Image (cartoon, grey):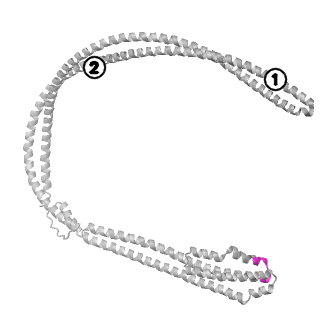
Amino acid sequence: MKIAKAIKVAIVFFLLFSVLTIGSLYMLAESIQKQDRAVEMQMEAKQLGDELLDSSEYLTNELRNYVQSRDKENYDNYWREVNEAKTRERVLERMTEMHVPEYLVDKVEQAKQSSDVLVGLEKRIFQLTEAGEYELALKVSFGEEYKQKKQMVIEKLEEFQQELDAWATDLADSMTNQMYLFMWVTIALVVIMALNSIGTILYLYRKVKPLSVVTETADLIASGNLRVPDLSISGKDEVAQLSQSVGKMAKSLREVISVVSDSSDKIASSSNDLLMSSEQTAQVANQVASAMQEMATGAERQAIGAQTSSQSISEMAEGIRRIAESSNFVSVSSQEASEQAVEGSSSVENVVNQMKLIDSSVAQTAEIVKELGEQSKEVGQIVEVITAISTQTNLLALNAAIEAARAGEHGKGFAVVADEVRKLAEDSKQSAEQIAMLISNIQASTEQAVQQMQKVARVVEDGTLVANVAGESFERIQRSIQKVYEEIHEVSSSAEQLSASSEQVDEAVKEVLNLAVEASSQAQSVASSSQEQLATNEEIAASTASLHQLADELKRTMQKFAL
């Protein structure tokens, strides 16, 4: 088995047993908690049984003390225990919460039934005591019947207490056994994990131990001694494969170094011949490079002059083109301005017509407002008449009231009518006064509206005159723009012709520039090639010298290996 696979298997087993151990530890902790709870329940169960016995004994003592002393406190204590403390009910409820078996609950129920029978007898004793039959009450409370029923309750409670204690003890023992079980399982898992770890370590040690032989062989190879013995480590694991690879590496190194040693002698001889040839070639290339450099300098000067001329002509052509574009733009703008001037003139004419309509509407509105003012005056006159009538009616009502008062009993009905008429007259007078006030406000507002309408009429008239002047100005602007458009059109045509001519000249100059640049580029390329060839020759010479030096060093290095 390979070491990597063995390690993987060991890790899987370790993780598996780790998970099992953690689970066992968790279950052990749970069982310890359950055991603690079982012990607590055992103690609480004993306490519950004691409480039931103590409660029964307490009720008997309070009953007998009351019969003997007839102390009200004993009576109250008895019924407080029965009605308020309710020890039996509380014990039953707690037992249900503790999940006590049903047969134990039945035991408590039986004890409760027996206790209820005893409570009935105790009620009778209380009734005898309250009736003044003290001797009979004492006889019954200490009699055989009471003792038998009391003993029955105590026997039921003691039986319940014994069985409850036995159940709690069994539960605690069961939890303790479960705790010990998980504890031993945990210990067993830990022991298995320890044995697995020890076995894995021993296995890996046995597999890795042969690496010392491989290390010694690698040290010999590193020191230059290639006469190493063959490694004979059997197996298919990584250590065996490593030993076989080291053996193959030693064999390959012997073969390679032998070949390199033979080749280094040949390289040293060839590098001397190459060094002499490269020095001669470098001298010739240096002469060619100087001549090509002078030729490239002349061609470059010619190209710079042609380029300057081409740039000047290009700039002139660009300027003419921009003039042509600007002329076209101005021409289009003039045409648009002319059209807008026509639209403006038409808009001004519409404004004049609209002003006339507004003037007419304002005049009509002023006439209507004047008529409204006249009508409000007539309404004011009518209100004055109503006010006078209400005043006269009020006086008549007052006279009628006076006459009714003189008439005595016969004039009472007439006096009531006269009083209502007087009230109506006063209301009419007040309403007439309010209407008069409103009419006065309407008349004032009407006069203001008439004045405002007159101002608006004057403003509209002035606006009409201004709009007429604006219309005449738009017509003059339209004629001027038309003249500008015709002149700009002629300038644009001339600029386009001049732009076409300058473009032809620019193309010719550019062609000359291209020829000059091409000649300069070719000369520069030749010069550059010569320089590159010269540099290459120098590099070849330097490389040849380095190669000769490396061949010597390689030869000295190969002498370090023992083949």
| Residues at marks 1 and 2, CA–CA distance in whole angstroms | 102 Å
Q: Is the residue 328 above or below the residue 535 in the image? A: above
Q: Is the residue 334 above or below the residue 397 in the image? A: above
Q: Quadrant of residue 559?
A: bottom left
Q: Read off the magenta span.
A: 67-75
Numbered label attached to residue 318: 2
Picture coordinates of residue 526, whole percent (x, y): 13, 30
Q: What's the amino acid at mark 1?
A: Thr
Q: Residues within 10 Å of mark 1 (few under 14, many from 20)?
A: some
Quadrant where the image shows the N terminus: bottom left
Q: Is the residue 218 above or below the residue 282 in the image? A: below
Q: Which sits earlier in the primary sequence, circle 1 or circle 2? A: 2
Is 521 positioned to the left or the right of 490 in the image?
A: left
User: Do we see residue 452 in this rendering?
Assistant: no
User: Do we see residue 284 in this rendering?
Assistant: yes
Picture coordinates of residue 536, whole percent (x, y): 14, 38
Picture coordinates of residue 553, whole percent (x, y): 14, 51
Is 368 positioned to the left or the right of 515 in the image?
A: right
Quadrant where the image shows the C terminus: bottom left
Where disc 2 sits, the SS reads helix
Q: What's the amino acid at mark 2?
A: Glu
Q: Residues within 10 Å of mark 2 (few under 14, many from 20)?
A: some
Q: Nearer the viewer, mark 1 or mark 2?
A: 1
Residue occupying image coordinates x 40% and y 12%:
478
Numbered label attached to residue 391: 1
Residue occupying image coordinates x 30% and y 14%:
492
